[in-house]
Image (cartoon, helix red, strand yellow):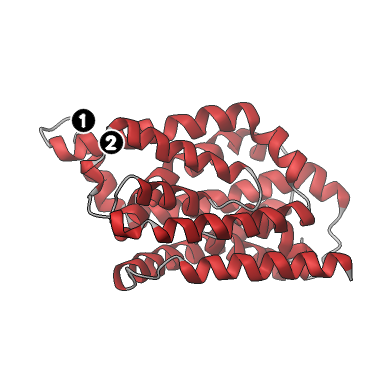
Amino acid sequence: MTILQTFIFAIVQGLSELFPISSVAHGVLTPYFLHWNLNPDFLKEHFLPFVVMLHLGTAVALLLYFGTEWTSILASLFSGNKDARKLLFLIIVGTIPAAIIGFILEHPIRHLFSNVTNAAVFLIINGFLLYWGEKMRNKGRKNIRDLDYSQAAVIGLFQSLALIPGFSRSGATMTAGFWAGLKHEESVRFAMLLATPKIAGAGILEVPKLMHSGMGNLFHVALLGGIASGIAAYISVYLLMRWFHVNEVTAMRPFAWYCWLVGVGVLITQFI
């Protein structure tokens, strides 16, 4: 990939990873929309390590944004802060379903569904998921620490939908949070906290492959992409938290419309 392509792809990745619009779908659709003829050898040998670097940038952005909270959560292991310790256990319980399902099914599912048409179809379905989640907003009265562990597990199970290109990790998690009765801002916050170990863990597991992938000069390009992705992710989580704080009534609706318009637009181009 060229430097320009790297920055475009990294910014799209950083924004779409946390906005409820599916980063995997945008990873498929961005080269399609911009008519990039990427080298087959790059796609086969180096694309995964390249994307891993972008994900690590996103994970760093989340850790920085929620740094104070993560410090409190980890410190609860050695202190008497019961609220922070319960939050830690909720995150662990919510992470387990996606970790297990991802370990078993991630590569088969993404290989099976990662083409332009499928990404567009599932993006449309993701829009309906977001719209349905918005309809459940009146249930939102709880803070994260009011959840029980079975609800955290269900929210984590919804996070697994992100394995299918077109479904958004944050969108599915937030929708499940609304179902569990979380307030809008609390649901977004829990989605971001749940995403952090999943994204960081996936990246760390791939680091050895990244270091032995023979990327050569591409490593420096990927590093720049990771920095760009991290900056975009930090901006997106800041905007997302403010958006859901201010727009309690129709917060999900614009993202649902976006998914429908992009998905339908791609399908139309497929048949013209």
Q: What residue is drawn where x is 34% and y is 48%?
A: 190
The residue lying toward the viewer, choosing from 69 and 211, is 69
Q: What residue is drawn where x is 87% and y is 50%?
A: 40
Question: What is the distance, in whole Å, between disc 2 and disc 1 at their CAs?
Answer: 9 Å
- State the SS at label 2: helix
Q: Earlier in the sequence, mark 2 or mark 1?
A: 1
Quadrant containing the C terminus in the rendered view: bottom right
- Residue beneath disc 2: 88
Residue 77's disc is 1
- State the SS at label 1: loop
Q: Where's residue 198, x and y in %? A: 48, 40
Residue 221's disc is none
Q: Where's residue 125, x and y in %? A: 62, 55
Q: Where's residue 211, x and y in %? A: 65, 38
The residue lying toward the viewer, choosing from 35 and 64, is 35
Instruction: Please state which of the two labelled residues, at mark 2 or mark 1, is closer to the viewer.
Output: 2
Question: Residue 163 occupies which quadrant of the picture?
Answer: top right
| Left or right of 8 on screen, residue 178 | left
**Residue furthest out toward the left:** 80
Task: Please report contact status of discs 2 and 1: CB closer than 8 Å, yes or no.
Answer: yes
Q: Which kind of residue does numbered mark 1 sit on?
A: Leu
